[in-house]
Amino acid sequence: MPALPISLSLRRLAGSSWSDVTLAVVTAAAQMAPLLFVHSDSGRPWHWWGYVVAVGASLPLAVRRRAPAPVLLVCAMFSSLYDLAAPLAPQPLWYGVLIALYGMASVSPPRVRIPVLLAICAVGLASVGSPNTATRGVVLYVAAYALGRASAGSRAEAAALAERAARLERERQVDEERAAERERARIARDMHDVLAHSISLMVVQAEAGPVVLDTDPTRASAAFGAIAGTGRDALDQLRQMLAVLKDEDDPHAPQPTIHDLPALARQVAGAGLEVSSTAEGEPRPVPADCGAAAYRIVQEALTNVVKHAGADHVDVRLRWCDDGLEIRVVDDGRGAGKNLPSGGNGLIGLRERAAACGGTATAGPREDCLPGFEVRARLPLAVPEVGVVA
């Protein structure tokens, strides 16, 4: 049998009531051994009182877990009465008292165990006949008491470690749940961005196609081609995001970066909107989360222009600073459109994406007071020290 099952079986046996019964019987046998196997010098049998005392100082150990202090007092009382009769085998009846003292010290509170220890030591000193025996008895009693307290300390430490492990496990589960919630929120934002952007472009192209179908077939064909391309791109991005929910080995789908912004601008320009892109300053490395946030912020801003602004021109401006990247998306629209319904979460998603990587984002009228709308964002180029805002 493996060692571990044997160890577990022994632990279960030691913690059962049968172990105390067995201990009481073994202790009684050990304390009666001199009476049974040692003969007196006169040849006379030992007095029956010795057997009574040996049993009385041992059998109470069977209930030592239920009443440790009373069991110790009973064992000590019988042990102190051993020398009342003669002839008896010369022996101190310490076994039962020491075991009971160990048990009491390991489980009883200070207000119980300390007075009982002092009482037992006093009775032991008064009932022995020689100083050497009294000294040995006190040393043994103190040693048994110290072992009991050490056992209590070990159990308390084990319980504290078990509680700490359980608390850490609960905290780990909470962290995993929060991480899952953040990941679900990220996926929801990505799906909102992809669907809102792609469907808006497809709707605009679909509405423009029939209008120019008879007058300008080439332009109509380009519009339908743009619809197909936008749809395929949306499907590819959705497949990547949905793969996150199926593939545990690849927990993060590939995210777009700032380098994908030109392709995004060309895609929007295919919907009939004039898009210009400018950059100021020296480009610098961008953390992965900030790069994805920059792409999604520009994508959401362009989607809002296509859906609501009624604009002819939109300008995407990037400005590289020493400690951050400033993004401005400015259009010359005349207000929100009435033909397309709003998703309701676009502007909130802008702020959340910027805050998730330690940045800020705002949206409102243009700073130059000209007609149109402006989205402004600032993202850090260094990893933020603050916690992630989900």
Image: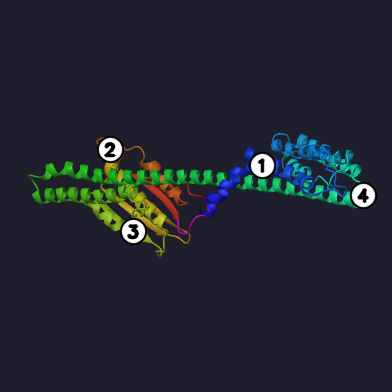
Q: Which residue position holds label 1?
A: 22
Q: Whole-percent x and y of residue 343?
A: 32, 38
Is label 3 in contact with label 2 (beta carbons under 8 Å)? no
Which label lies toward us, 4 or 3?
A: 4
Residues at marks 4 and 1, CA–CA distance in whole angstroms: 33 Å
- Local crowd at mark 1 within 10 Å, few (<14), some, or many (≥20)? some
Q: Residue at x 66, y 48 (%)?
A: 157
Q: Is residue 364 visible?
A: no
Residues at marks 4 and 3, CA–CA distance in whole angstroms: 104 Å
Q: Which residue position holds label 2?
A: 337
Q: Whole-percent x and y of residue 137?
A: 84, 48
Residue 278's tag is 3
Which label lies toward us, 1 or 2?
A: 1
- In the rendered structure, which disc, 4 or 1, sits on the residue that comes first in sequence? 1
Q: Residue at x 24, y 52 (%)?
A: 267
- Local crowd at mark 2 within 10 Å, few (<14), some, or many (≥20)? some
Q: Which residues are magenta?
A: 380-386
- Local crowd at mark 4 within 10 Å, few (<14), some, or many (≥20)? few
